[in-house]
Image (cartoon, rainbow, N blue to C red):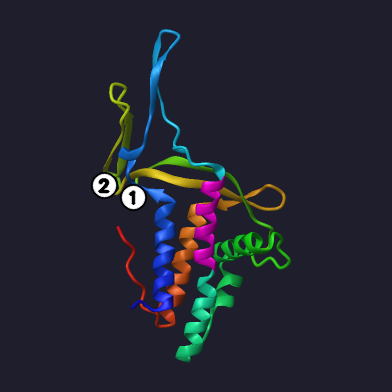
């Protein structure tokens, strides 16, 4: 049986997977004829409502932020020094996720750990193409008009997929970070803290 902390880490990995998918072949397109012209249209939201996308974002935020309490309990049981609060206070990405979590729970933020009042805007599902690193990395995206299939071919460390996208802004509307990038960096920071505390980290599914 998995320990509570091990299961929580795996839940976080699942939440990260739920907001991004490499499987473009599952994307549905709309095709037809209008005003004598043939068209092919794709909406990468794929029918997901704003509420559904917000649920995915909230689940990811909660799974990242609640690692603090689970790590605290592990350290207490194992006689290890707890560095969760120090991590929140010194890592902006971790602090932003923590503030988003508290705002989601309490509807307001009375104590900001990031130095601002962060919120998510422009929440949607988008196409993501990357060239990766190195000179030979790249991705080619195309849509077959005859079949409506969405196709992408990557080389090197390039990649393609769809992902839940949003921007984190402060109380003045100034952008402070890309939502998924912040969550990925915050996850890595927590995983490093877990390792330092002696917690075995399960591998993420490819």
> In the picture provided, is 7 more to the left or to the right than 147?
right
> In the picture provided, is 39 more to the left or to the right than 145?
right
**Residue pointed to by mark 1:** 133
Residue shown at 46% from the left, 65% from the top = 187
What stretch of residues is rendered in magenta?
51-65
**Residue pointed to by mark 2:** 156
Query: Between marks 1 and 2, how big is the CA–CA gap?
Result: 8 Å
Residue shown at 40% from the left, 62% from the top = 13
Quick one: SS at disc 2? loop
Could you tell me residue 26's position as x and y percent? 33, 39
> In the picture provided, is 121 more to the left or to the right than 125?
right
Seen as rendered, the residue at the extreme front is 1
**Counting residues from the N terminus, which is met first, the one under dot 1 or under dot 2?**
1
Q: Reply above or below: 90 against 116.
A: below
State yes or no: residue 13 in magenta: no
Q: Main secondary structure of the magenta part?
A: helix
* Residue 204 seen anywhere in this rendered image of the structure: yes
Identify the disc placed on residue 151. none
Query: Badges 1 and 2: C-beta atoms under 8 Å apart?
Result: yes
């Amino acid at each position: 049986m998995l320990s509570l902390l091990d299961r929580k880490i795996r839940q976080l990995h699942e939440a990260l997977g739920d907001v991004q998918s490499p499987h473009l072949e599952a994307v549905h397109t709309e095709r037809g004829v209008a005003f004598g012209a043939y068209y092919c249209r794709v909406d990468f939201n794929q029918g997901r409502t704003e509420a559904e996308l917000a649920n995915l974002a909230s689940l990811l935020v909660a799974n990242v932020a609640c690692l603090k309490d689970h790590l605290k309990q592990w350290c207490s049981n194992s006689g290890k020094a707890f560095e969760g609060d120090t991590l929140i206070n010194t890592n902006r990405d971790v602090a932003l996720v923590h503030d988003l979590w508290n705002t989601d729970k309490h509807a307001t933020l009375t104590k900001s750990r990031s130095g601002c009042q962060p919120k998510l805007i422009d929440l949607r599902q988008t196409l993501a193409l990357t060239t990766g690193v190195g000179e030979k990395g790249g991705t080619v995206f195309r849509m077959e008009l005859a079949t409506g299939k969405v196709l992408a071919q990557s080389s090197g460390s390039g990649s393609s997929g769809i992902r839940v996208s949003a921007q984190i802004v402060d109380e003045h509307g100034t952008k402070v970070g890309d939502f998924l990038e912040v969550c990925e960096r915050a996850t890595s920071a927590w995983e490093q803290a877990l390792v330092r505390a002696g917690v075995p980290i399960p591998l993420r599914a490819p």
